[in-house]
Amino acid sequence: MNPPFLADELSNFNTTPVPTKTLANMFSPVSQGLNLVPLSFFEMEPNARDPYFQEWNVALQKVVAGVVSVEGAYVGSKGTKIEFSRPVNVPKPGPGVIQDRRLWTRFAAGTYVENGGYSSYHAFQGKVEIKSWRGMSWLASYAFAKSIDNLSGDTQGFQAQNPDNNNGEKGVSDYDVKHRFVLSGNYALPFGRSGSGIVARVIQGWELGSIVTLQTGQPFSPGISTDTANTGTSLRPDRIGKGTVGQRALARDFDPDAFRAPAQFTYGNSGRNILYARGFKNWDFITLRNFRIRERMGLQFRGEFFNFTNTPRFGGPVSNIQSGTVGRILSAGEPRDVQFGLKLTF
């Protein structure tokens, strides 16, 4: 006996500016166009086990000169029997109408939620910290890491190219970042602390703050727009070269010639998340001045500069190898943003 499944009627979205659906007309009669064939379906493994995660770490810490704290750590984790949405009722690659070649021809492709997912994470994490020394506080952290799984690209199913091979989706996680460095600090300027004249009043009470982030890019998968396998699940091309270029340019961020459309009625052999997008550099800067008005009342002026150096943070390249703009970068993040503010405390 098969487990029960759930069917959804997706035509009843009440999203017009003036809602038109009411309890009286929410569900149309079958005779008025409710199409239930072929119907997609959703199943769950009847004997599914609870997923579990294991985490471990070891760290060494040393305080130098009573001021600087240095720490190095190895961090690891492993996920087992994680929920994985696998496409089912998908035909084998071959010729002919897809619907006629399904195992259950009265249904479209469905989703089967099972415990086929797994993940692993390993990282070296380092940290150097100065909590308070002569008005300065600094924290520098660095991580060298790798995350692997077979499910971070799984979005409500239909993301596995070959439904019969969960391991075919094994690759670095969508959120994998090899290197990440962050330096943050705050410095209360010492000028004018002991003075009482006009110059001292102008230069005293200032603080500077900064956050610098350096990070390598996240992975992506070159893709195709045609269903070469004739299954409805073709996702990736054949890989015939490395795919990287010696000198990246906005018009050619990776090498499209290293990929080609698969032969008819076959899946592409290219793996998931085999290339990395560009990393980014960012510097956020803040300057502030505290004014004492009364014993319990103060005024703070703040000037905040996000992306202070106006360094572009480029988006990922067009990854569809059959697109006319393949390999090009067509987007970027926010430019420099400056804002000023006053805050009254009492």
Image (spheres, rainbow, N blue to C red):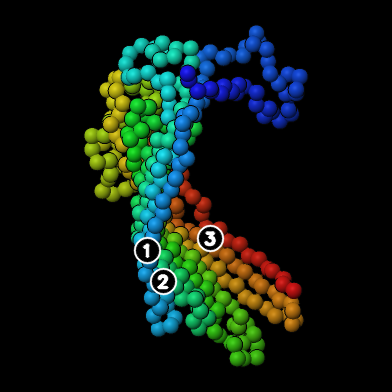
Q: Is residue 169 left or right of residue 48?
A: left
Residue on which disc 1 sits: 58
Cβ atoms at labels 3 and 2 below 8 Å apart: no
Where on the picture, by quarter, is residue 189? bottom right
Of 296 and 326, nearer the camera is 296
| Identity of the residue drawn at 35% across and 54% down | 122
Residue 328 in the image, given as x and y percentages of width and height: 38, 40
Image quadrant where one finds the C terminus: bottom right
- Callout 3: helix, strand or loop? strand
Camera sees residue 224: no
Q: Which residue is mark 3?
A: 306
Residue 290 as seen in the image, left or right of residue 141: right
The residue at which mark 2 appears reads as: 128
Q: Earlier in the sequence, mark 3 or mark 2?
A: 2
Please name which of the two marks, 1 or 3, marks the residue nearer to the observer: 1
Label 1 close to label 3 by CB (< 8 Å): no
